[in-house]
Amino acid sequence: MNLAYLPRTHQRVGEWGLARMKIAFLAMAGLIIGVVGGATVGIGLGLAWIELFNTSEFEGFAGMLVFFTFMPLGALIGGLGGATLLGMLAFRDHEIAITRQRMPREGI
């Protein structure tokens, strides 16, 4: 076993593992933020739809339309968009971090 080569190998695996964890964490955070934001936008669009098209209020039809149609669609679209956006940003940041080179210190 080559012990001089061993730490360098583990360091590479560790760096990529941390990068994957960062990508996964930011994608999950984007999913949560996107779901909440998308549901909020969906409620707003549903209320606008009811006002613009004079949807019937009979037996709560307008409320059911908003909360069973527009809110879930907004949450689905927002969650997918948020997870994709933050995941791609984290992935691109990882790619940039690999290509950076350290500047030599002066005065040492």
Image: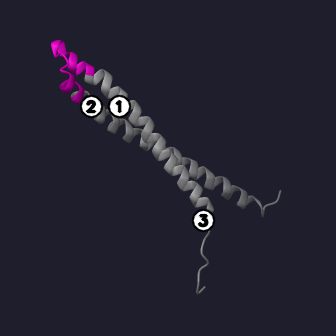
Q: Is residue 13 above or below residue 59?
A: below
Residue type beneath disc 1: Gly
What residue do we see at 32% from left, 22% from top? 69
Q: From the viewer's perspective, is the residue at label 2 or at label 3 nearer?
A: 2
- Look at 18% across and 15% down and name the residue there: 56
Image-based side of 92 in relation to 3, left or right: left
Crowding near the residue tagged with mark 3, few <14, some 14–19, many ≥20 C-alpha atoms within 10 Å: few
Please provide percent x and percent y for residue 66. 26, 24
Q: CA distance from mark 2 to mark 3?
A: 44 Å
Q: Is residue 63 visible?
A: yes
Q: Give the residue number, with chain letter if any, for mark 1.
A: 74
Magenta span of residues: 48-65
Q: Quadrant of residue 51?
A: top left
Q: Is residue 61 magenta?
A: yes
Q: Which residue is mark 2?
A: 45
Q: Residue furthest bottom?
A: 107
Q: Residues within 10 Å of mark 1 (few under 14, many from 20)?
A: many
Observer-nearest residue: 55 or 61?
A: 55
Reading the image, the residue beneath label 3 is: 100
- Identify the amino acid type marked 3: Arg
Residue 53: say if magenta.
Answer: yes
Left or right, 52 with reference to 18 = left
- Report crowding for label 2: few under 14, some 14 to 19, many 20 or more residues within 10 A (C-alpha): some
Can residue 22 be seen at all in this image of the molecule? Answer: no
Name the residue located 78 percent from the left edge and 61 percent from the top edge.
3
Whole-percent x and y of residue 44? 25, 33
Amino acid type assigned to the residue bearing label 2 in the image: Leu
